[in-house]
Amino acid sequence: MYGINKNLKLHFIGIGGIGMSAIAKVLMNLGYRVSGSDLGEGETVLKLKKAGAEIFKGHKEENIQDVQIVVYSSAINSENPEIIKAKKLNIPLIKRAEMLAELMRLKYGLAIAGSHGKTTTTSFLATIMSGLNLDPTYIVGGLVKNLEDNAGIGKGELLIAEADESDGSFLYLNPIMSVITNIDNDHLDHYGSLENLKEAFINFSNKVPFYGVVALNANDKPSVEILNKLKRPHKFFGVDSKKIYSDSVDYLAKNIKDGEDGASFNLHYKEEVVEFKISLSGEHNIQNALGAIVLAHSYGTSLIDISKNIIKFEGVSRRQDKIFERKDFVIIDDYAHHPTEILATISTVKNRYQNKKVIVCFEPHRYTRTKNFWNDFVASFKDADKVYVSPIYAANEKPIEYIDSQVLVKSISNTGVESDYLEDTNEINKVFRSYKNENAVVLVLGAGAISKIAKQIVKDELQ
């Protein structure tokens, strides 16, 4: 990218997406002209517009004006009018991950992949490297609170990026070092089977050079199972309070203390023991922190310096994000939409607020995901005191017969967890009102519209 004529204009279809906007920001900071379209005008789009991007509301053929490159995400289908117009005009169509790969090509790339925890791990690493004055460029799939953005352009050699495995496009990347946080059976609509998904992670791992390193989670069985096909140097990280599947662990967290204000642990590496504190709770977040620590340490920084800087991380928007707190009533917003994420998030919140009822408002995301993991979803709410389920967020999918939230509510209720159906996602307003005078924490979960709705209700009615 750095050698390409800066007079070229790049157009982003769906520029408001968190991953798309991050790349657009970096390119604008590098001096490229950027335009983009999106269905709405949220805060991210408005920031890009203020920074100088030409923004179009809605997807229309006429949005492709004086454009030399069109960038699109996996959420954009082939029937999009801007895709069709670009094809007519023979304008190169580039996937988001291809553009990210081009940015990474001339940098020292650190890529974070995995089914869960990518955004948090990437944010930990960006915080550490920024605190060490290494001035990295970073591209994150969420707003990092302490960095006040989801992207930053640095003068240093590092490019830290979240690698999206959902459609296999992370295989465009060629990082020097990488992390695999875990491997879980998500995105099977693309991969078809867990074995195919694992094969993709093997191929991703083997993209690092012979002098690079792959950080693997020793607590995650599928991550350990790919070891026999790994052709590149690797290091294992893990927590000793969970089952360890590898024969040895290079970075091991012991003496874990987990509370409302975060977690602490002693990190054992060879003969060295260093105390770490992080601002997030939950063993899954300790694992995320460990993944970032491995890459920072492998890059050549000391564990002591890493420990001094990792504490600066304040969290990511929509990851255990406390959006309201008054007296005994708390509302937490979280992106969790896969059963594994839901189970871990509820467990963490239950542990943090042991004297409060944990009430869950969940918006299922996609009919295919709900169908594929039906039994797992039903079991994932076991630690909740009550669950409210809103209609499935389709994400452009067509409904599937017998797959709906009302049936899901009945199945959850059959496990002994009290559950109710919300006819509209906006009805979470009623849930907030019902519990606002009780000693309760309401956990808002989902990857669709529920977060925006919750935040608007808090702004309009609870502040």
Image: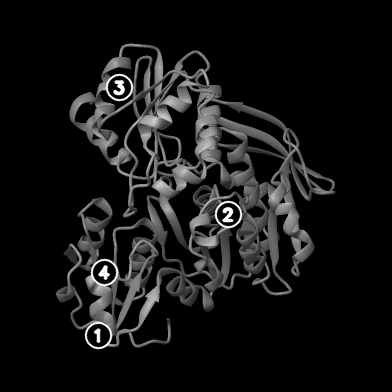
| Residue at 69% from the left image edge and 46% from the top image edge | 220
Dot 4 corresponds to which residue?
A: 80
The 10 Å Cα crowd at callout 4, few under 14, some 14 to 19, many 20 or more, is few
Q: Earlier in the sequence, mark 3 or mark 2?
A: 2
> CA separation, marks 1 and 2?
36 Å
Tell me if 211 is positioned left or right of 22 in this view: right
Q: Name the front one of labels 3 and 1.
A: 1
> CA separation, marks 4 and 1?
13 Å
Q: Amino acid at mark 4?
A: Asn
- Examine the image and state in which quarter residue 361 appears: top left
> CA separation, marks 3 and 1?
50 Å
Q: Amino acid at mark 1?
A: Lys
Q: Amino acid at mark 2?
A: Gly
Q: Earlier in the sequence, mark 1 or mark 2?
A: 1
**Where's residue 355, x and y in %?**
50, 13
Q: Earlier in the sequence, mark 4 or mark 1?
A: 4
Dot 2 corresponds to which residue?
A: 114
Secondary structure under the numbered disc 1 in the rendered image: helix
- In the rendered image, the quadrant that contains the C terminus is top left
Dot 3 corresponds to which residue?
A: 431
Secondary structure under the numbered disc 2 in the rendered image: loop
